[in-house]
Amino acid sequence: MKQSRNFYLFFTVSIFLLALVLLVMNDVMSIWDGAEANNINDANSGIYTSIPALVLGWMSDSDFPFFQRLPGILVILGGLAGFYGIGWRIFGKETTLLTILFIAATFLVPTLGKLATLDSWVFVAQLLAIVSLLRFMKEPIFLWQLVCYLFLLFALWLEPLGTLILSLSFSIGLLIKHPQGRNLLKLQPWLVLLSGLAIGYILNLLTWQQPGLLIGFFQLSYAKYFLISLLALFPIIGFCLGGIRDLFLKLGRGEELSIVLISWILGAILAESTILQVGFCLLAVKQLQAWSNPKYPFRNWVKTGAILHMLLVFGFGFYLMTKGFIEFGPAGYRAGLVVTLAYWTVSLVGVIGLYSGRRPLLIIGHVLSGLIPALIFWLSVYPLVESKRLPVKVLSTIEKMDIQQQKAMYFISEEKGPPLSLKFKAEEENRSFYWLRSQAALKMLENETTPAGIYVFSAANKNQFFNQTSDSTRTIKIWTDKLMTEDWIIVDHTP
């Protein structure tokens, strides 16, 4: 279907909003412990196990989070452009462009794009590998064979097990069920995958469980993976519900696209891949396109999903405002209110489009109900969250305590290591940072060999360490990176 100039204008504005969502607050947001901190720490240590790690190593020289996160953002935007370049001949121009808009509207891909993890790279490599495989199946020429091999091997290098499971299950599903599936016998993706796996294993090029990957095979439990994937699809959940019902109906008839989508979705679920989002976005777009057809049979499914979504948004908004007021006072309440009103109002535009049959309202409401609230969240709610995170809270408290700059910081715990986010933040302020195990710290106290410094530890150990009245002590309440509250102690210790 030929698109109007207004559609292309809206597409351009939406991509601009996506870029804003990806970029805003990246200079303020301190590094998150876990995958992002592990990835940056490896790059800082010169551990270059892949091209993304090498690029991050170059960016890490600046010690500025904005530049460390910039490669992932460019990869996401470039990957969406690549998806259009390869996929428009398969799905059609309108379907491909609308799918890109729906990907931008979901919450998972833009959020992962803001972090300096491997997730952006894995998402794009797996997405373009799968789409180029489809393109070869439709047009079995050398160009698409080469493109498919390159992205398959790159994805295999980044995430071996997940890519192997995703690609094999997707290829076998198409080979068995799709009318043009036999073209894959010319491609032989399984041989390329297994050969790449064997060579990578022999040369020790593969990392079986990436510490710098947030979502991937065995990175999360299936329960967490399903929950995150479901919540990310909330702005388009109505069309997803109608699409699932439509998918099984058309699968029984042997429709080509339904075979592609069921293979895509099942393969992504088995591999715990983030390209599951793209499979559901394609499914939702086909329902949006069919909505203007009076004979579309699943209107009640879509409307039910959209109304339930509105009710859940209302409930979420009430929780956000209440939690915001409890944690941050009036500022938290106002921030929660603004996000809730934006989300609910724009979602209402989509619901009006469903009942009125006006296609522009359908598209605008569903796309902006993801992009606008996300942008407002990062601008209004996230700065409040950042103020209570461990690295920011510790350093701001130290500043208020007027502690000498030359004093080193000691973090005491029994876990595998200190929060790297605190380490990076301390080093940004040119403060030496050390980690002490609890037993080692106790031994130093007993021998009275504890050096002067700033000691940070959990309030659960407050009776074990530095009970002297001569030490300047502060108790702070912080939010962990799992958004749980904990009490911590900061001690300015002078022997």
Image (spheres, helix red, strand yellow):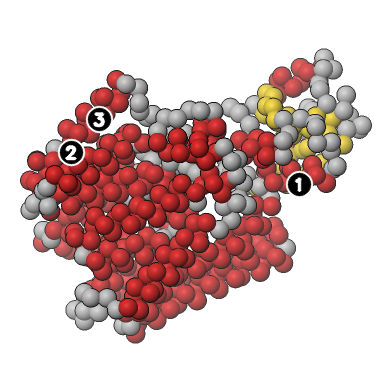
- What amino acid does circle 2 point to? Pro
Instruction: Find the distance from the CA under tag 2 to the CA under tag 1.
Output: 54 Å
- The image quadrant of residue 236 is bottom left
Name the residue at the top extreme: 447
Find residue 7 and report its image quarter. Answer: bottom left
Q: CA distance from mark 1 to mark 3?
A: 49 Å
**Residue at point 88%, 24% (across, down):** 495
Label 2: how many Cα within 10 Å (few below 14, some 14–19, many 20+): many
Element type where label 3 sits in the image: helix
Number of other residues with Cα within 10 Å of mark 1, as a class: few under 14, some 14 to 19, many 20 or more: few
Q: What residue is disc 2 on?
A: 189
Mark 2 / mark 1, whichever is N-terminal: 2
Which residue is under mark 3?
196
Identify residue for label 1: 396
Q: Which one is in front, 257 or 16?
A: 16
Tell me which label, 2 or 3, sits earlier in the chain. 2
Residue 150 shows up from this direction? yes
> How far from the left and from the top, in percent, is residue 311?
47, 71
